[in-house]
Amino acid sequence: MRATDYKIARFDAAERMVHWMAALCFLYSALTGLAMWSHKLFWLAWVFGGGPVVRATHPWVGILFTLVLGLMFRRWAADMRLDDDDRVWLRNSHRYAVHAEEGLPDSGRFNAGQKMLFWTQSAFTLLLLASGVVLWFPEVMPRALRLLAVLLHPLAAIGAMGAIIVHIYMGTAAVPEAFRGMIQGWVRPGWAAGHHAKWYRETQRRSGR
Ligand code: HEM
């Protein structure tokens, strides 16, 4: 059998479902959050059913997003631990950005950039949850906490949106076949060997090839 004649399983159905649930919840929370943040973006509220609907649903979808991200965390946290190769990769990540990857250490199932996104996103989500709960029930919160939350919530949201914009670009335009992996669950061996060589070798060892 030629190398191109078989598919390598990248994400199982549960991983893909959790990922796309997270994506939907994130998009909804981000757009409704922007609608409430600036009057110039309030037109977005009408897309989602008007101001009162957006005000009522945004925190609940935020909670749902946190829960879904918790599932993602449980599934992927072990794969996301940084090892020594990842640290070398990160120190030389400018090469990855300009498509000059030769000499960068081989990546496992996720490369060091993807791992950083995961941890950054997890940290932003915790901040969003904590500050969001304060903004949800301001009447029972001390003034100092309210002021901190007013500052932290949009800052964490901007950070998370920035990270996700980079992630969407990487998962679609920059690394084309990655998207099929997250839709159909499989990738070509050539793609796996090129982008995640260490992981590719493991899959080959496990399947006895
Ligand atoms: C809405 C648009 C999104 C698109 C098009 C997208 C696309 C993708 C793709 C193609 C992959 C697979 C990458 C690979 O095989 O190496 C992936 C993985 C992943 N996605 Fe997304 N994603 C989106 C939103 C999100 C959101 C909102 C989150 C979490 C807050 C998220 C978190 C992750 C994580 C942690 C991974 C695994 C590591 C990585 O590839 O960065 N994604 N995504």
Image (cartoon, rainbow, N blue to C red):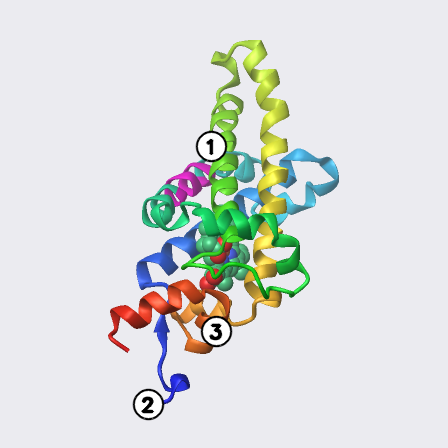
Instruction: Please tell me which residue lies in front, 55 or 158.
Output: 158
**Amino acid found under the numbered disc labelled 2:** Met
Q: Nearer the viewer, residue 186 or 64?
A: 186
Q: Which residue is mark 1?
A: 126
Ligand 1 within 8 Å of disc 3? The answer is: no
- Residue 66: image quadrant is top left
Instruction: Single out the mark in the foreground, 3 or 1.
Output: 3
Label 2 crowd (10 A; few <14 / some 14-19 / many >=20): few
Mark sitting earlier along the chain (2/1): 2
Magenta highlight on residue 62: yes
Image coords of residue 107 (percent x, y):
46, 59
* Mark carried by residue 1: 2
- The three-letter amino acid code for the residue at tag 3 is Trp
In the rendered image, is residue 23 in sight?
A: no
Question: Which of the image's four quarters has the N terminus?
Answer: bottom left
In the picture, measured across the screen, residue 42 lies left or right of residue 202, that is: right
Range shown magenta = 61-69
Left or right: residue 70 versus residue 37 is left
Q: Quadrant of residue 71?
A: top left
Task: Residue at 32% x, 63% y: name it.
Answer: 13
Q: Residue at x 50, y 51 (%)?
A: 112
- Mark 1 lies on a secondary structure that is helix
Task: Examine the residues drawn in magenta and state their main secondary structure.
Answer: helix
